[in-house]
Image (spheres, rainbow, N blue to C red):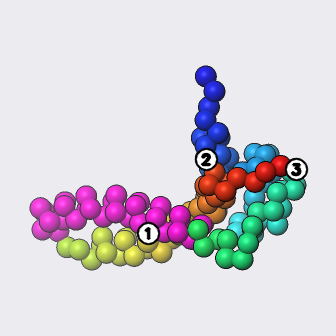
Amino acid sequence: MKVPYSWVLIWRGLRLRCPNCGRGRLFRGVYTTYTRCAYCGWVFEREEGYWTGAMAVNLVITELLIAAFAIPMAIVLGTTQQPVAVPIAIGIAVSTALPFIFYRNAKSLWMSLDFMIHPVEP
């Protein structure tokens, strides 16, 4: 059974690899992106403002994760009459940390999604 190409691109994005060849690494440091792929020469930043989509992906992932924990926590706190100071402190810390934690993955997934939407001819 052949795997759809879109799944291959998502897999490359999750592994932080070049969306074009799947072999080249995207990052040389924690947050520093290579300019182009070392194997195929693919230029990672296609145009000015290219990473705006990565910021949107990062925002969506962060907000979904926060909502996944905040909604059940609000239900539990509403039924048990517990103080809300600790969950608010945890929520502030998590909502501040998650965008930094998912920065690399959001950038990589954005490149894969963009490659699906706007493929480049060889």
Closer to us: 16 or 101? 16
Q: Earlier in the sequence, mark 3 or mark 1?
A: 3
- The Cα atoms of the two marked residues, 2 and 1, are separated by 26 Å
- The Cα atoms of the two marked residues, 3 and 1, are separated by 37 Å
Closer to us: 86 or 61? 61
Q: Earlier in the sequence, mark 3 or mark 2?
A: 2
Is 79 left or right of 20, judged from the image as shown?
Answer: left
Quarter residue 74 falls in: bottom left
Mark 3: which amino acid?
Answer: Tyr
Judging by the rendered image, the residue that carries numbered circle 2 is 10
Q: Residues within 10 Å of mark 1 (few under 14, many from 20)?
A: some
Q: Is residue 100 visible?
A: no
The image shows residue 59, relative to residue 48, as above or below, that is above
> Which of label 3 and label 1 is nearer to you?
3
**What residue do we see at 72% from left, 77% from top?**
48
Report the residue that reaches farthest toward the front. 121
Q: Earlier in the sequence, mark 2 or mark 1?
A: 2
Quadrant containing the N terminus in the rendered view? top right
Mark 1: which amino acid?
Answer: Val
Judging by the rendered image, the residue that carries numbered circle 1 is 94
Q: Position of residue 38 (x, y in %)?
A: 87, 55
Mark 2: which amino acid?
Answer: Ile
Q: Position of residue 82 (x, y in %)?
A: 17, 68
Contact (Cβ within 8 Å) of mark 3 with mark 2: no
Judging by the rendered image, the residue that carries numbered circle 3 is 39
What residue span does the magenta drawing correspond to? 54-82
- The Cα atoms of the two marked residues, 3 and 2, are separated by 19 Å
Q: Tag 1's secondary structure?
A: helix
Q: Tag 2's secondary structure?
A: helix
